[in-house]
Image: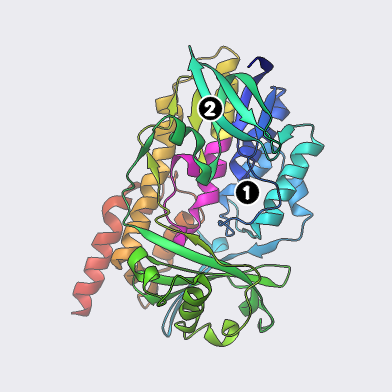
Amino acid sequence: MKIVENTDILIIGAGPSGSVAAAYLQKMGSTAIVVEKTKFPRIVVGESLLPRSMDHFEEAGLLDNLMQKGFEKKLGARFIRGNEICIFDFSKKFGKGWDWTWQVPRADFDLALTEDLQAKGVDLRFETEVIDVVFTNGKSVTTIQDKNGNQSQIQAKFIIDCSGYGRVLPRLLALDTPSQLSPHSAIFTHIHDVNRPAGQEGIQISFDIIEREVWLWVIPFSNGNTSVGIVAPTTYIEQLSTNDSLQEKLTNAINASDFYKKRFGGLPFIFEPKHLKNYSKAVHKMYGDGFVLTGNSAEFLDPVFSSGVCFATESGLLAAKLAYKQLQGENVNWEQDYAAHMEKGIKVFTTYVKEWYTGNLQTLFFHQPEDPDVKAKICAVLAGYVWNDDNPFVKKHDNLIKNMAHFINMSKE
């Protein structure tokens, strides 16, 4: 098979990470080809964004188009535990940064991103699958296959893997390693929200805690539909019904929510529920000679704090910047400039996910009376600003939550 094309950078995947990377490279005048296995629009998890991603969309030149689409504004997040309610308002967070973002049907959101890329002249190819990659002295030859089964090859100076759950290079290069997090799974669908209350209550994104490690997400969209999903230990998910029916499992989960069963109980599902089993993933290295991994292709933690798209756009933009610099002949220290940066943010959110499931973070969320200073600093983390060491809940994440929860519990005793 002959090499029929050459490009500076090959981007695998056209989700938020790949779109941000491609838009930045197009703006800088670098030649890039984006290959995407699926056909858009397509349904995918990750419908709740974080304010930090707005910085990335803006820098990549994608924000103006997104602003015209009318997606539902996400001003914060609500956590519910029985009769207790904790609301985080992004406008009251610690430090600088965006005060809002969006909650989006990803099928529409990702389509809007790729349509903007194509309007900008990006070479984007849907229904094109990566079959094989061979690296030689930092350059790569990638075999791709289109929807008709025709194969061809692309030679690239660098590859940015933004393949998300497809995990193309981790799979081909055996880069996967066990996640630090315990096995959890999720089931979700969309519901036509005919019982949606008027005002803020109807559009409030919420996380309803059914048990300490079991929670329901509710993400209302501007199109009148709402995403509803259950997250729990995999063993709990398996026991939600006597058979393997995802419809029955999700129905039973909705009915277990005292807060939401009246709003959503008995309503039909728009599509067959999607099942993400043991979704947490990790790799033993994020880069190599001639490639870098971004977003979910590198690490996926847990949907509880909506960090997925934030890490995708943070890593996609940074990877594109560093790859461009390297191809311009500048020295790039991928360990320091990329891996260490991403791992820092991942460690912060990993702590928050772990302490959520231990119950320590829930203790802080629902403690009364609220401490506005503590809440503002935690809110900054939940907004995605996990690289700001001025925030002690970032800098001392590995022990501060645990210690504060211990103090609160001791004071109650």
Q: Position of residue 179 (x, y in %)?
A: 34, 47
Q: Looking at the rendering, in which quadrant would you find the C terminus?
A: bottom left
Q: Is residue 229 visible?
A: yes
Is residue 180 a member of the stretch shown in magenta? no
Front tag of 1 and 2: 2
Horizontal and vertical percent position of residue 164: 53, 44
Q: CA distance from mark 1 to mark 2?
A: 34 Å
Q: Quadrant of the N terminus?
A: top right
Q: What is the span of residues highlighted in magenta in the rendered image?
A: 296-316
Which residue carries the number 1 mark? Answer: 54
Residue 304 shown in magenta: yes
Q: Residue furthest front?
A: 149
Say which residue appears at 53% left-offset and 74% top-offset. Answer: 247
Tell whether 249 sits left or right of 44. Answer: left
Give the mark nearest the N terminus, 1 or 2. Answer: 1
Q: Secondary structure at mark 1?
A: helix
Which is nearer the eye, 362 or 261?
Answer: 261
| Relative image position of residue 292 (x, y in whole percent) | 49, 29
Q: Nearer the viewer, residue 103 or 64?
A: 103
How many discs appear? 2
Whole-percent x, y for residue 155 in the image: 61, 18
**Can you identify the residue that label 2 sits on?**
132
